[in-house]
Amino acid sequence: MTDAGEPEVTVILPCLNEAQSLPGVLAATPSGYTALVVDNNSTDGTAEVARAHGAMVVTEQRPGYGSAVHAGVLAATTPVVAVLDGDGSLDPRELPALVAELDKGADMAIGRRRAAPGLRWPWHARLGTAAVCWRLRHRYGLPVHDIAPMRVARRDALLGLGVTDRRSGYPLELLVRAAQAGWQVVERDVGYGPRMGGRSKVSGSVRGSAVAALDFWRAM
């Protein structure tokens, strides 16, 4: 917290039809963090559920993960922003450990997903992530093994990278631009569990993974 007691971290939750999952995610958001839900054309009452549970809500009508994340970063007013999916597969209570890495000198801290026992993690999603991260390590020298579904960075510096992808390639372009800018990127293990509800927009199908792979290729 700042000396004035104002929040230092905004948790950006890009959401498309996550009304079922949001209550649990918002309840787990660390005390003192501001939850900001970006509603990306939901039809299940996501925005209403978010407001009912105390979150700020921003509406982004341009479709795409990158559009939602960028809208959230623009709307945030805190020095630090965190981003994670609103489906409940990642635990917001792990965010303070990532934020602490910024205090130690990191420019960005990301979570490396470690699957919970028995989790069904589609092979096409795991294979795609492994291939992309191999390229990030060998071409750009980034010590990463995941494409940052949970991440924290300083807001102004993040905007300064000028990430332009507005689809599922956003996190990959972010990592590439961070490497090109000489950022220190730190990776920590985080738990990865089942969705609390709904269906994945990317890894829930082979087609979704294929679309994401195309976006990733363009970003690299």
Image (tube, rainbow, N blue to C red):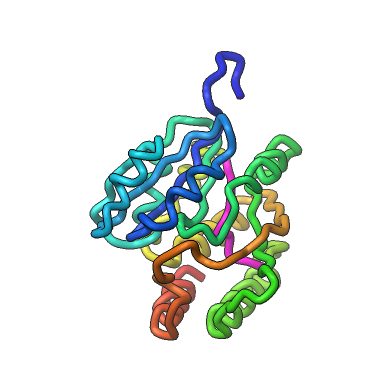
Q: Examine the image and state in which quarter residue 95 appears.
A: top right
* Residue at horizontal 58 percent and vertical 65 percent from the top: 147
* Residue 30 image offset from top left, x and y in percent: 59, 38
| Horizontal relation, residue 74 to residue 193: left or right | left
Residue stretch rendered in magenta on the structure: 145-153
Residue 1: image x %, image y %?
Answer: 61, 24
Does the magenta-highlighted stretch encompass residue 149? yes
- Residue at position x 39%, y 84% from top? 207
Q: Horizontally, is 128 left or right of 140 in the view?
A: left
Depth check, front residue: 56 or 100 = 56
Q: Is residue 102 magenta?
A: no
Going by the picture, which residue comes out furthest to the right? 104
Q: Nearer the viewer, residue 207 or 214?
A: 207
Determine whether 143 is above or below 93 in the image.
below
Q: Residue at x 27, y 58 (%)?
A: 44
Q: Residue at x 43, y 73 (%)?
A: 202
Quarter location, residue 2: top right
